[in-house]
């Protein structure tokens, strides 16, 4: 199987070839989707440093976790978890994310290990709290709302994959009708704010990533962590420790669609940014089971065309606070 960390751009399915392979790091290659048989053009976002230059075999450094720590949570006096009935005995659990301010993007100190030029750090204020899915949308949830399950690895509690941005937004629209609450994809800023949960390190648990922390290609750990298993498939949601706000699989498993068009960050402070006004690509976040460690970082940004369906991409639902 070809390496990907990655960017399968399904040019055939899309009827478009809008990606300039030279514009993305790592050049391109092609692979065949085991699920659809479609040939896709793949650009590898993982970069040379992810392949060989990270020190291997070193233990994770608890010191980095202690140094950055985790935000206290849940907060006193704020709404508790929300559980919504999707029908047929299927529910969705969401956790409340309080309003707040954070530094979006990554500091220069992350630059030695896969930091991208588009991670310009800037202050973001999230003015309104919201509920975010504790887990990636599962196949059971997708089936309950959409009446179909396009996933490659069929199992009720694994994340749905092979859903396009268009599919994900349709899910949110139908779920809105189903539950009587406004459901949408998170913005990129909301996603990163929720992922960090008050932390400033590369990951919500610290500055290193090994395969016992998340589902990604454990051959390419991050921050001096030891090599680990490359599972080569999705895992059941919630198989790893949640962040301080109770969110699971924000790093790895499947990339998660965000509502934004991909674009350049502002350099100054902003409130509730919605992303670029238009564009070619929608943002995905968090990395996948197929990603190198560095592309699972809280600040790492990636993008696909809205129509792309791939077995590395899923999503998470946001419910607007009343
Ligand atoms: Ca994920």
Image (tube, helix red, strand yellow):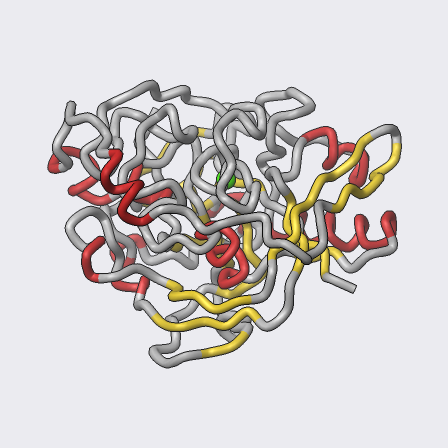
Residue 209: give x, y in percent of width and height.
31, 35
> Is 318 left, or right, of 250 in this rendering?
right
Residue 107 in the image, given as x and y percentages of width and height: 25, 61
Q: Where is residue 55 in the image (x, y as percent from the top left)?
A: 12, 33
Q: Residue furthest bottom?
A: 268
Q: Is residue 141 toward the left or the right of residue 277 in the image?
A: right
Compare residues 19 and 82 and report the one nearer the observer: 82
Quarter of the image for residue 161 reads top right
| Residue at the far front in the pictured view | 76
Residue 44 appears in the picture as rendered: no
Quadrant of image for the N terminus: top left
The structure residue drawn at horizontal position 45% and vertical position 71%, both measured from the top left corner, is 124
Q: Position of residue 150 (x, y in %)?
A: 66, 31
Task: Report the front residue among 43 and 217.
Answer: 217
- 71 or 15, nearer to the observer: 71
**56 versus 296 height, above or below:** above
Identify whether 126 is placed above or below 1: below
Residue at position x 22%, y 44% from top? 47
For the question of whether residue 271 can be seen, the reply is yes
Question: Looking at the rendering, which quadrant does residue 141 occupy?
Answer: top right
- Report the side of 249 relative to 64 (left or right): right
Pick the residue in front: 133 or 261: 133
Q: Give the residue displayed 73% in from the left and 36% down from the top.
A: 142
| Above or below for 148 versus 235 | below
**Marker count (numbered):** 0
Where is the C terminus found, in terms of image quarters? bottom right
Residue at image location 58% in from the left, 51% down from the top: 307
Left or right relative to 12: residue 54? left
């Amino acid at each position: 199987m070809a390496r990907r960390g990655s960017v399968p751009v399904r040019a055939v399915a899309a009827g478009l070839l809008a990606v300039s392979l030279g514009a993305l790091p790592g050049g391109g290659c092609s692979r065949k989707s085991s699920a659809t048989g479609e040939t896709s053009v793949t650009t590898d976002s993982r970069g040379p440093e992810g392949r060989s230059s990270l020190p291997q075999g070193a233990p994770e450094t608890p010191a980095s976790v202690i140094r950055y720590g985790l935000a206290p949570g849940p907060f006193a006096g704020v709404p508790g978890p929300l559980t919504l009935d999707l029908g047929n005995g299927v529910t969705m659990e969401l956790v409340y994310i309080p309003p707040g301010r954070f530094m979006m993007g990554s500091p220069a100190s992350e630059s030695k290990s896969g930091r991208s030029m588009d991670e310009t750090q800037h202050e973001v204020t999230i003015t309104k709290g919201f509920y975010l899915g504790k887990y990636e949308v599962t196949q059971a949830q997708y089936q309950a709302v959409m009446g179909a399950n396009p996933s490659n690895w069929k199992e009720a509690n694994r994340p749905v994959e092979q859903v396009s941005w268009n599919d994900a937004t349709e899910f949110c629209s139908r779920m809105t009708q189903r539950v009587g609450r406004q459901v949408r994809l998170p913005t990129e800023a909301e996603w990163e704010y929720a992922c960090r949960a008050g932390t400033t390190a590369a990951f919500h648990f610290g500055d290193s990533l090994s395969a016992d922390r998340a589902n990604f290609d454990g051959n390419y750990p991050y921050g001096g962590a030891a090599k680990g298993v490359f599972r080569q498939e999705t895992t059941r949601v919630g198989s790893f420790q949640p962040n301080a706000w109770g969110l699971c699989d924000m790093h790895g498993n499947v990339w998660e669609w965000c509502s934004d068009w991909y674009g350049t960050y502002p350099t100054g402070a902003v409130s509730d940014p919605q992303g670029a006004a238009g564009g070619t690509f929608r943002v995905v976040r968090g990395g996948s089971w197929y990603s190198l460690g560095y592309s699972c970082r809280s600040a790492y940004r990636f993008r696909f065309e809205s129509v792309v369906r791939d077995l590395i991409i899923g999503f998470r639902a946001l419910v607007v606070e009343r």
